[in-house]
Image (cartoon, rainbow, N blue to C red):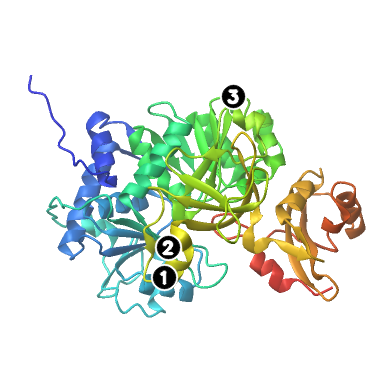
Amino acid sequence: MEQKVLSMSQQLLIGEALKYAAHNVPERDAFIYGDRRITYRELLTRSIHLAGWLQAQGIGVNDKVGCLLKNGLPFVELYFGVSLCGGVFVPINFRLVSKEIEYIVNQSDVTILFIEEEFIESIRSINLPQVKLIVPIKCGDSELQTNMISYEAIYSTPADYEEVNFTDEHAHAIIYTSGTTGKPKGAVLTHKNYYMNAMNKLYHSPPRKGAKQLIIPPLFHVAALSSLLQNCLIEGTIILHHEFQPDIVLKTIQDEKIETMFMVPAMWNFLFQVPNLLEYDLSSMTNCALGGAICPIEIKKKILQVFKNASILEAFGQTEMSPSTTYLAGEDALRKTESVGKPSINVRVRIVDEEMNDVPVGEVGEIVYQGPTTMKEYYKNKEATKEAFKGGWFHSGDLVRMDEEGFIYVVDRKKDMIISGGENIYPKELEDVLYAHPDILEAAVVGIPDPQWGEAVKAFIVLKPGKQMTEEQVIQYCQNSIASYKKPRAIEFMESLPRNATGKVLKTVLRKGAYQL
């Protein structure tokens, strides 16, 4: 019998991973969304057709394709379709307001934009001079403009796909940072960046071949997006959710026998508030992955209590690093729970002072990086790129310390550090204390102007349902647990903390609303 030989590029290209999985396990479900399932064979067929259609519209190597979509199969098909034709994938946070979307689409030079039907009117209201074609996923009763074509119409249009020659050093995606300190910056990530990040993850916590994974965070978030490639490499199945509903998450774990799941710390915290949490069968879970924000120690402990057959995989990093730079996994997650682990295998790490001198073990400094997962540049922003790569290392803005065994502990974001009366105060230290209180659901700490001390500490508190505390009780609790100069001078109770789409607390919003003492 004639043996089929798979012809593949020697480059580390995203589309090649899909081809390989489709060759090996063509009839295995690659992705599941609601009642829709798509096998690897079907996904490759549709992605190639979409790539051919994009080529017919003039999309080639380095041309930008925008994605304003929610989690679902069209997002996945577009991700691989753009990769196959050598284009650059630009996922956009659909929770942004119109003017923010306008800035990202124009700044990134997107020429074709895929959108959800619900965004048609808001897209019509903004100026996108470079966008020549808009593709709504579902049209319903919406009337399409002359520069629009429905997504499904693409698949009824003949399309011939031509193989494209490009290297893994070419841009694969432009991921825009949260923009909490100004205009968002577009981190240019290459095919090789994504592959090296995937290799890191699979090395530090190798899943079962064919494992089932649940993805809930929006796919425009770099950590969730990276799971699409990783899924192909292990020939696994991803179940996609388009929104976070804690009870539905637990039911999906039970019904689909989910083995691994990634969520940001806030999501894990809300999951544990489900009243009948322990009635669900969660025994299939072997890996609880978390990242996207600094995780309070109490949440890690709760994960290990609830998911008794699972270990923690904590990934620390940032968008510009594709994103992960350190991992905490296996027995280390129990022994060094307060740490974010050790540097990944192909990420070079230093902890430095303001003059780029290495700090001694145990001392606090900024963590800086080199390695093949480091972004290429900030798109069309030479000044920001130059600033980020001072001295040939990427500057993270994160303050950390390292112990004698090489484990790294996040102290705080450099920009979030509070200086009060000449003393450095790290919000995360106080936030960990607050999270340990049985009546507190969430906490965030910021510095506010103070005429005597320069800055003072203010804590924003979200209480658990049915619980009550006074400002004095919170301050007294902190004073019993932490040095007096670190305790909050002001407390504000809130119904919820402001967060961006990736789960990070928007401390700039909290600072703007804080009153001077």
Q: Secondary structure at mark 1?
A: helix
> According to the image, label 1 marks what residue?
104
Please identify the quarter of the rendering in which residue 3 is found.
Answer: top left
> According to the image, label 2 marks what residue?
92
Along the viewing direction, whichever of 264 and 511 lies nearer the viewer: 511
- How far apart are the two marked residues, 1 and 3, measured between alpha carbons? 43 Å
Q: Earlier in the sequence, mark 1 or mark 3?
A: 1
Residue 515, compared with residue 347, is above or below; it is below
Residue 257: percent from left, percent from top = 50, 28
| Numbered disc total | 3
- In the image: residue 191, left or right of residue 101: left
At label 2, the amino acid type is: Ile
Q: In which quadrant is the C terminus drawn?
A: bottom right
Q: Earlier in the sequence, mark 2 or mark 3?
A: 2
Residue 376: percent from left, percent from top = 36, 58
Residue 188: percent from left, percent from top = 37, 60
Q: In which quadrant is the N terminus drawn?
A: top left
Residue 114, compared with residue 380, is above or below; it is above
Residue sitting at x 62%, y 29%: 307
Asked whether residue 205 is in view, the answer is yes
> According to the image, label 3 marks what residue?
309
Residue sitting at x 12%, y 53%: 160
